[in-house]
Image: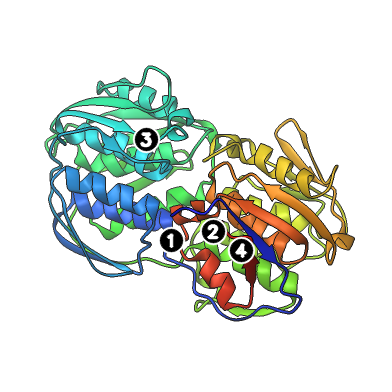
Amino acid sequence: MDRAKLTILPPGKPLIGRAVPPGSKSITNRALLLAGLAEGTSRLTGALRSDDTRYMAEALRAMGVTIEQPDETTFLVTGTGKLLPPSAPLFLGNAGTATRFLTAAVASVDGTVVVDGDEHMRKRPIGPLVAALKSLGINVEAPTGCPPVTVRGNGHFASGRVEIDAGLSSQYVSALLMAAPLAPKGANAPVTVALAGTEIGARGYVDLTLAAMQAFGARVEQIDAATWKVEPTGYKAADFVIEPDASAATYLWAAEILTGGRIDLGVPNDAFTQPDAKAFDVISKFPRLPAEIDGSQMQDAVPTLAVLAAFNETPVRFTGIANLRVKECDRVRALSLGLTAIREGLATEEGDDLIVASDPSLAGQTLPAEINTFADHRIAMSFALAGLKIGGITILDPDCVAKTFPTYWDVLASLGVSYTDIE
């Protein structure tokens, strides 16, 4: 049964122990899709099993891919090199990666596919990706500019040059890149994916996409900083190791420095290739964080950094975070409301910037506050950090962490954190 709320008891001591983050959600969903598009059996190890990856796996199964899970961190994926038309709309919850990636990939299906999600996903924009697919001649429509999206495919992706406005999300670029090898092998030219302008949210995630594509046999040439040429190779099955989730690691790095603890993540801090790993260097500067933090290239780490900033010695302004308004919820607003619930004036919004007033004296106080998570896993997990130093922090809908880190509350408990008022 889902819990309505969970109140954190400040441990009053350093958090010490071993806490290995789950596998990367971003890499797991890329690898699942590419393995599903490949011919043969791929073994994905170190993978994340969570709501987001479950939705991707179920969607692939609905299109003829066989997926076995021999243990908690392994997927065995067997594909034929071709996705089949599903018998019903693909329901992807609020999984942005699965929704955006599949919207492009299902253009290779010979038939009609509806890509849909929950009430939150139906508010998340997908218009730029739909427009890009239409420019290639693909029959696709999303009347609201958000899911549901209806794609009527003809059995292969389209060849040609496509421009994409990636200002809202780098996932649009990744979606096109991963679908591009599915173009006809006899096409006159490879697929060229180009940015419309130079704006791109979290470019590092495109690098993750390219690395995964190449591991499954794709050939991609980067022409310049805004253009990629993708050969119509299709994909080949591969064994693929998925690294731990850097976004999840940020909560543990912050918990360690907030409590003066020592938490062994089981992997060196410099071993992560994901963009959010950049947050480690910022976190290590606490309690003297920079006066301005540009979150554009480590977007999912911003909630962690914003809550940490509440205890900083001096105020912090977060810039480059407009994209956070179209994540699982409006995270700029959710962070502002949550911090303000702890203490009036602790956070303010200026345009799309977030300013955290910072007050080291918050630590040790009891300031009862119910944090509305807006069903957003990152809001829940980041505000748990406030509960490590402030009494009375209550997280509403705590089980929303199942989206990417199902064992989060157990992991904190293993390090010495206790809870009360669990309902």
Q: Tell which of 130 and 422 is nearer to you.
A: 422
Q: Which residue is mark 1?
A: 24
Q: Position of residue 294 (x, y in %)?
A: 69, 47
- Disc 1 crowd, CA 10 A, few/some/many (<14, 14-19, 20+): many
Nearest-to-viewer mark from 4 and 1:
4
Amino acid type, mark 4: Tyr
Residue 38, relative to residue 327: is it above or below?
Answer: below
Proximity of marks 1 and 2: CB atoms separated by less than 8 Å: yes
Q: Is residue 94 left or right of residue 87?
A: right
Picture disc at residue 423? none
Picture disc at residue 117? 3
Could you tell me how many numbered marks the image carries?
4
Q: Tell which of 148 and 82 is nearer to you.
A: 148
Q: Which residue is mark 4?
A: 251
Proximity of marks 3 and 4: CB atoms separated by less than 8 Å: no
Q: Earlier in the sequence, mark 2 or mark 3?
A: 3
| Secondary structure found at label 4 | helix
Q: Earlier in the sequence, mark 3 or mark 4?
A: 3
Which of the image's four quarters has the C terminus?
bottom right
Amino acid type, mark 3: Gly
Q: Which residue is mark 2?
A: 247
Tell me the quarter of the picture where residue 251 sits.
Answer: bottom right
Q: Position of residue 102 (x, y in %)?
A: 30, 39
Q: CA distance from mark 1 to mark 2?
A: 8 Å
Residue 55 can be seen, yes or no: yes
